[in-house]
Image: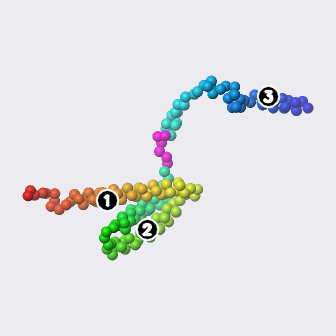
Amino acid sequence: MAWHDAAQRSVRSRAAAEVTSVDLLTRYPAATLPTVPRVPSSSTASISTTRPIRHPLKHEQAIVKLRRELIPLQQLEATKGRLLTMAETKKVGAIPDLIDEIEQLENDSRAWFEDDTEFNARCDTVANAAVKLVQKSQKAAAKKKGGSGGGGGWKTAR
């Protein structure tokens, strides 16, 4: 029985020694508690400046290539006010095939345990990169086309 009495005494002493947060708040009102200023540590500063790792899609290069082909065709399809030529109509007819191929490559690039929001964010990043590339190439083509306007740059006075 001696061991039983000793075990009960140790349980009682632990229970008496335990102080809960409720006990602390009743003993010390919030006005008397010292406040510790939060100073950002060097690790939080480095975390806030660090860029996260971006895992590229498995078929990212092929998707960008197909999207670069698709964007001008969608712009051609959206033109209003004129009829398309036969060649342009054939090009526009290839849009569903391009979209299907892009979707197939994107689904093949999906990670095992990736949820829809993460996957869609990765796909949108690739799509936005392709749009920027197309816009950059269109600006360069327009600049090149506008700069070589016949006559070799010489103007005559009238």
Q: Amino acid at mark 1?
A: Gln
Q: Earlier in the sequence, mark 2 or mark 3?
A: 3
Quadrant (top left/top right/bottom left/bottom right) for the C terminus: bottom left
**Closer to the N terminus: mark 1 or mark 3?**
3
Q: Mark 3 sits on what residue?
A: 13
Task: Give the structural element (helix, strand or loop) at label 3.
Answer: helix
Q: Is residue 134 visible?
A: yes
- Residue positioned 13% across, 57% down in the render: 154
Horizontal side of residue 28 vs 10, given as left or right: left
Tell me the CA gap for discs 1 and 3.
80 Å
Dot 2: few (<14), some (14–19), or many (≥20) neighbours within 10 Å? some
Picture coordinates of residue 155, whole percent (x, y) = 12, 57
- Give, as a three-letter code, the residue at label 2: Leu
Q: Which residue is mark 2?
A: 98
Residue drawn at x 43%, y 58% as measured from the top left: 127
Secondary structure of the residue carrying tag 1 is helix
Q: Residue 1: x, y in percent?
A: 91, 32
Height in image: 86 above or below 21? below
What residue sits right under mark 1 in the picture?
Answer: 138
Q: Is residue 5 placed above or below 77 in the rendered structure?
A: above
Vertical relation: 69 (above or below) 118: below
The residue depicted at 52 percent of the width and 37 percent of the height is: 44
Q: Which residues are magenta?
A: 48-53
Give the mark nearest the N terminus, 1 or 2. 2
Q: Which residue of the protein is positioned furthest toward the right in this rendering?
A: 1
